[in-house]
Image (cartoon, rainbow, N blue to C red):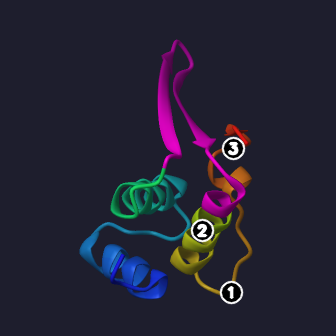
Amino acid sequence: MSTSLNDFVQKTVEAMDHFDKNNMDCVKDVVRDAINFYKLNSYEEVEETNEGTTRSLYIHSMVEENLLSKVVELSVGTDRDLYLEEVYQSFVIRQY
């Protein structure tokens, strides 16, 4: 973890040529990258149904939830308050 959270989010967003801060799928991509980069125990599960794809975020600890919340905040900017619950349409399961 030699890079700061701000630097990580900035580099990740810049590397995504399709990033749109109003598109929740783009924000989820940044969250997934953060989980992998920081080797978190939290994970995302994908469920295919007749209605479409549902992504659920399983959070391992309060520390990881705070880190991922900050990633969301940094990726959309300070002009908008956005929470993990909104990004994942309330499909957030806390396992702590």
> Image check: 7 left or right of 64?
left
> Is most of the magenta stretch helix, strand or loop?
strand
- The quarter holding residue 7 reads bottom left
Q: Which mark is residue 79?
A: 1
Count of numbered labels shown in the rendering: 3
- The quarter holding residue 56 reads top right
Q: Which mark is residue 67?
A: 2
Indicate which disc, 3 or 1, sits on the residue closer to the N terminus. 1
Circle 2 sits in a helix, a strand or a loop, which is it? helix
> Image check: 35 left or right of 62?
left
Q: Which amino acid lies under the numbered mark 1 shown in the image of this protein?
A: Asp
Indicate which disc, 3 or 2, sits on the residue closer to the N terminus. 2
Q: Which amino acid lies under the numbered mark 2 shown in the image of this protein?
A: Leu
Circle 1 sits in a helix, a strand or a loop, which is it? loop
Q: Is residue 59 magenta?
A: yes
Residue denoted by label 3: 89
Q: Is the N terminus in the top left, top right, bottom left or bottom right quadrant?
A: bottom left
Q: Tell whether label 1 touches label 3 (CB within 8 Å).
A: no
Q: Is the C terminus in the top left, top right, bottom left or bottom right quadrant?
A: top right
Disc 3 to disc 1, C-alpha distance = 20 Å
Q: Residue at x 49, y 54 (%)?
A: 28
**Of the two numbered discs 1 and 2 in the rendering, the one whose residue sits closer to the viewer:** 2
Q: Which mark is residue 6?
A: none
Circle 3 sits in a helix, a strand or a loop, which is it? loop
Q: Is residue 78 magenta?
A: no
Q: Which amino acid lies under the numbered mark 3 shown in the image of this protein?
A: Gln
**Of the two numbered discs 3 and 2 in the rendering, the one whose residue sits closer to the viewer:** 2
What range is drawn magenta here? 41-65
- The quarter holding residue 59 reads top right
